[in-house]
């Protein structure tokens, strides 16, 4: 289970506030003074879920023996990242779409094995939001035995495809 995610944003306070709205939670300044201008969005749920939102160009790097990690600013950072998350929210689909539209952020309804609404925070960081109805689809698809069977079958198909 993922309890914590860190992302960057050009406007970290604003992005944390919008995430908190989607979570129906709250946002706060990041509690560690070593991360100025960073914020956290929390749904205040039973899982301790948090999303840290750091200023754009912030990179987390391996630390020393005494320090688990450090951070630095990289002025050559790409605006995009492969990091994304699927997050269950108590917010209905139409509210998610309305909030994204209000912010001018791209949102796309995507179906497949389960439904999600892709929301691109600042049109650069992808989060897949699962309303309560979508979350039940996701959990049904990700049930351990079903998921294992699906992944095993997909791996076999991939091996056959690459062999040809």
Image: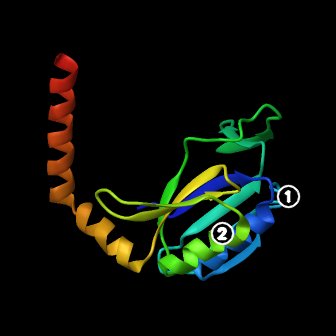
- Of the pair 27 and 118, the residue shown nearer to us: 118
Can you identify the residue that label 2 sits on?
A: 101
Q: Identify the image quadrant of residue 60.
A: top right
| Coordinates of residue 123 in the picture (x, y in percent) | 67, 53
Res. 89 in view: yes
| Number of numbered discs on residues | 2
Side (left or right) of 129 relative to 32: left
Identify whether 155 is placed above or below 33.
Answer: above
- Mark closest to the chain's N terminus, 2 or 1: 1
What distance separates the C-alpha of mark 2 from that of mark 1? Answer: 29 Å
Q: Position of residue 124 (x, y in %)?
A: 66, 49
Q: Secondary structure at mark 2?
A: helix
* Above or below for 123 versus 131: above
Residue 34 is left or right of residue 6, and the answer is: right
Question: How far across and down, in percent of the image, does residue 152 sit?
Answer: 16, 42
SS category of the residue bearing label 1: loop
Residue 143 circle label: none
Q: Of the residues tagged 2 and 1, which is closer to the observer?
A: 2
Q: Residue at x 22, y 63 (%)?
A: 143
Residue on which disc 1 sits = 36
Q: Residue at x 50, y 56 (%)?
A: 85
């Amino acid at each position: 289970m993922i309890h914590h995610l860190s992302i960057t944003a050009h406007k970290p306070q604003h992005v944390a506030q919008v995430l908190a709205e989607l979570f129906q939670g709250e946002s706060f300044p990041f509690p560690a003074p070593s991360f100025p201008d960073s914020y956290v969005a929390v749904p205040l749920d039973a899982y301790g879920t948090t999303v840290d939102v750091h200023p754009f160009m912030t990179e987390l790097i391996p630390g020393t023996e005494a320090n688990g990690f450090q951070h630095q600013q990289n002025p050559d950072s790409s605006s995009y990242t492969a990091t994304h998350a699927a997050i269950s929210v108590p917010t209905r689909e139409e509210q998610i779409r309305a909030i994204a539209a209000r912010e001018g952020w791209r949102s796309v309804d995507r179906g497949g094995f389960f439904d999600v609404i892709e929301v691109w925070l600042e049109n650069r960081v992808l989060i897949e939001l699962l309303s309560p109805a979508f979350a039940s689809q996701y959990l049904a698809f990700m049930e351990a035995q079903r998921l294992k069977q699906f992944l095993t079958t997909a791996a076999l198909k991939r091996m056959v495809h690459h062999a040809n």
